[in-house]
């Protein structure tokens, strides 16, 4: 296993993170995703730790709190010392029928973090993330609440998930001006079949030194190896019952066609190649992998052993490249005689030779 700092902090996390959305069962979408009982969850956590994973991600909304309960109990059942793991969870989502049982208000987040602490059976959360965008609550209110959590010792680092780049940048400016705790991470969807994040979020994160935690790296199972151009709706697949996240399927089939020979050359599954591609991206801190079965987890863990050649990366980059979009193409056009193509991922300005 490899380890890297959590954003611009000194806390080291594994490049693979065990996501626990599959833990327990639930209503709505979670009946398609979850159904991992306590004994199986214990086995997955144990295998993860034995493989070197020290990073675990959950959320209060996963199976209405049951995922947090199951994960916390797994640590207790396995005798895992609290300091040996980095525990991340999220708050925002509806957790009751009341008008204020949802959102990023001070009122809801303060209640939500206390409930998460109880379910996880811990006195602190290493990374607490605002799970969604709340357009009703002023940013200052949310940031002050998060800052208070850190000062109270209930939370050690903070992050966000599924926010627009401009909103994150605005929040960082407020935090700097008012000496609030800054976000350390962004949790976002990213896969070789869904590279939209590269347009605005990735350049902003590189500039601000935010860590990227990737959710759904296999595009909801589309890149797992079950799907192909000739088998677009395999029986028993989670995505067949819950078609999410949104993916351009025509582009995805081309990507899977390109992945297939590379996977054969490495003697591995297409999933490992898709994960290895993500791990090669400079902005990625940790890739969140979820599993229902040990075999799935073991296959995903194998991505750490895959080293893609320059030619393989060029092939995958080309087939999955985003179509040109303004203002990107205009930046390149107008700057051609000064700095060449604009590398929006760069952390510092450089001049071509």
Image (tube, rainbow, N blue to C red):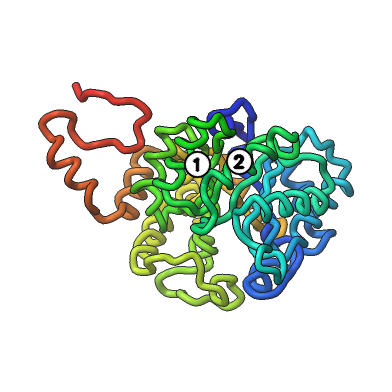
x, y percent for residue 71: 78, 52
Q: Quadrant of the C terminus?
A: top left
What residue is at 79 percent from the left and 47 percent from the top?
46
What residue is at 54 percent from the left and 29 percent from the top?
8
- Residue sitting at the far left: 337
Query: Closer to us: mark 1 or mark 2?
Result: 2
**What residue is disc 1 on?**
279
Measured in 3D between alpha carbons, the distance from the residue under mark 1 to the one under mark 2, in whole angstroms, is: 34 Å
Position of residue 164 relative to residue 219, above or below, is above
Left or right for 111, reference 353: right
x, y percent for residue 149: 70, 40
Q: Nearer the viewer, residue 25 or 171?
A: 171
**What residue is disc 2 on?**
144
Residue 272 shows up from this direction: no
What residue is at 64 percent from the left and 72 percent from the top?
32
Q: Are marks 1 and 2 in contact (CB under 8 Å)?
A: no
């Amino acid at each position: 296993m490899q380890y890297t700092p959590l954003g611009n902090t000194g806390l080291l996390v594994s490049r693979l993170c065990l996501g626990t959305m599959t833990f327990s069962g639930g209503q709505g979408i979670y009946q398609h995703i979850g159904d991992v009982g306590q004994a199986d969850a214990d086995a997955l956590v144990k295998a993860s730790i034995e493989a070197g994973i020290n990073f675990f991600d959950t959320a209060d909304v996963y199976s209405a709190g049951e995922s947090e309960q199951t994960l916390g109990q797994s640590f207790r059942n396995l005798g895992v010392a609290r300091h040996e793991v980095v525990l991340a969870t999220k708050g925002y989502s509806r957790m009751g029928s009341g008008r204020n049982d949802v959102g990023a208000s001070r009122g809801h987040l303060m209640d939500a973090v206390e409930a998460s602490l109880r379910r996880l059976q811990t006195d602190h959360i290493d990374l607490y993330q605002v799970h969604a965008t709340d357009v009703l609550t002023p940013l200052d209110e949310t940031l002050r609440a998060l800052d208070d959590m850190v000062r109270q010792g209930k939370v050690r680092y903070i992050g966000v998930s599924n926010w627009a780049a401009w909103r994150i940048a605005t929040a960082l400016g407020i935090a700097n001006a008012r000496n609030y705790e800054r976000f350390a991470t962004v949790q976002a969807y990213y896969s070789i079949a869904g590279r939209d994040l590269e347009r605005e979020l990735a350049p902003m994160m590189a500039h601000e030194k935010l860590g990227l935690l990737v959710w759904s790296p296999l595009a909801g199972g589309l890149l797992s190896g079950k799907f192909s151009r000739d088998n677009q709706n395999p029986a028993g697949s989670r995505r067949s019952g819950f078609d999410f996240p949104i993916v351009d399927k025509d582009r995805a089939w081309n990507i899977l066609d390109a992945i297939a020979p590379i996977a054969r050359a490495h003697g591995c599954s297409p999933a490992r190649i898709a994960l290895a591609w993500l791990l090669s991206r400079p902005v990625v801190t940790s890739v969140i992998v979820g599993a229902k079965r040990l075999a799935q987890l073991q296959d995903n863990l194998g991505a750490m052993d895959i080293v893609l050649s320059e030619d393989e990366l060029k092939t995958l980059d080309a087939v999955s490249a985003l179509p040109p979009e303004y203002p990107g193409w205009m930046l390149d056009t107008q700057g051609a005689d000064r700095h060449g193509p604009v590398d929006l991922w760069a952390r510092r300005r450089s001049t071509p030779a």
